Image (tube, grey):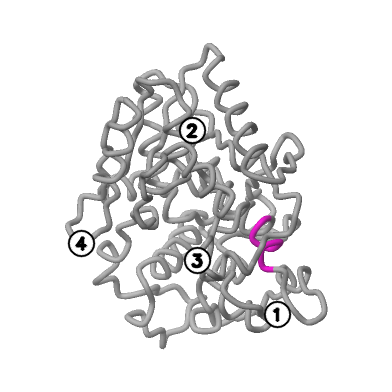
Amino acid sequence: MNSYLTYRYIVDENKSFSDEIIPHYYNSSSKRIEVLDSGDTLENIKRTINDTFSSKDSTALMLSGGIDSAILARLVPKGTKAFTFQPDLQESVSEVEIAREVAKMNELDHEVIKISWDDYDSSIDSLMTQKGAPIHSIEPQIYKAASVAKNMGYEKLLFGEAADAVFGGLSGLLSKDYTVEEFYKRYSFVDSELVLKDFQKIISPIKAYETNGEVDVHGFLNEVFFKESNSSYENACNLAGIEFISPFNKLIMKKPLDLERVRNGENKYILREIYNDLYPGVTPRPKLPMPRPVNEFFKNWGGPTRDEFRSDIEITNFTGDQKWMIYCLERFLNLFNL
């Protein structure tokens, strides 16, 4: 429970909620390819796309409003089916207009997939059962999109996933140097001390990246966060019976990330160079996080009631994503009668 709340998954692969529940982890089938610059990065992205579209299995693209999927949109064949999420709540963030512009520029067949609470509620238990753990709030909507694509005859779904972890896109986390304790407080998704009666501070996954008193944040994101995030996409796609593909999760930077460039506003500088070459004169729109309407879904939620949780939780102090994680943990425990 503590590991899920802190890292959004069970980091220690030798642990589980019970002996009968085996967590699923993302494990790449091949070694990640080292890339030096925008040139060889682009070549490797093209290779994955060409291999994907040259097979007999048909492929669709998940298109957001960011540069990662815009790069893919420029490289896939014209006429490729492209899907974009749109939550059905007025206050939620939508990337539809930006994605529609990108699709039009690249002559893609664009379609919007609307996401509702019913889509979430109807898939949470199946996703958790398959994963063997509570899930990320993006999984129900990825599952919805993957199911739509599968029902339309697609066998593969192409994402821009892992670009942030691999190429230094998480600017907030990379904005300064941290001690282990500082990064633990900064990174933890939910402070389990505020939520659980049996609180445990699981700091070893971060301590493994400590050198001379400072945390190698990019190294941590490139491995610990990388595995958690890719697991979420893969789990949702697997449940829908469609193959999850991302050119970015096959790559790793050979040289250390230039933190000075990232901290001066050039996050993902290698991918920005590629974007500028592919879209000369087109300024990328500010990236919005993947829309997840959890703030609205959990606006009036009263909090958990099981005995494992503290009775004095100030649930209104938590964000929508944090409420989701607490809710999901309790629902998982109830689902398996733990």
Three-letter amino acid code at disc 4? Glu
User: Start and end of the magenta stretch?
Assistant: 217-222
Where is residue 276? Give x, y as percent. 47, 44
> Which residue is farthest left?
90
Of residues 165 and 264, the one drawn nearer to the viewer in this rendering: 264
| Residue at x 76% of width, y 39% of height | 31
Where is residue 99? Give x, y as percent. 31, 41
Numbered mark located on residue 158 in the image: 2
> Which residue is farthest front?
281
> Residue 219 magenta-drawn?
yes
| Of marks 1 and 3, the one in the foreground | 3
Label 2 near label 1: C-beta < 8 Å? no
> Residue 324 magenta-drawn?
no
Label 4 near label 3: C-beta < 8 Å? no
Q: Tag 1: Cα neighbours inside 10 Å, few (<14), some, or many (≥20)?
A: many
Of residues 54 and 112, the one drawn nearer to the viewer in this rendering: 54
Of residues 45 and 7, the one drawn nearer to the viewer in this rendering: 45
Three-letter amino acid code at disc 3? Gly
Mark 3 → mark 4, Cα distance in angstroms: 28 Å
In the displayed structure image, the side of residue 209 where residue 77 appears, left or right:
left
Mark 4 → mark 1, Cα distance in angstroms: 36 Å
Q: Provide the residue designation for mark 3.
A: 265
Three-letter amino acid code at disc 1? Val
| Residue at x 48% of width, y 28% of height | 75
Numbered mark located on residue 180 in the image: 1
Q: Main secondary structure of the magenta part?
A: helix
Mark 1 → mark 2, Cα distance in angstroms: 35 Å
Mark 4 → mark 2, Cα distance in angstroms: 28 Å
> Which residue is farthest top?
56
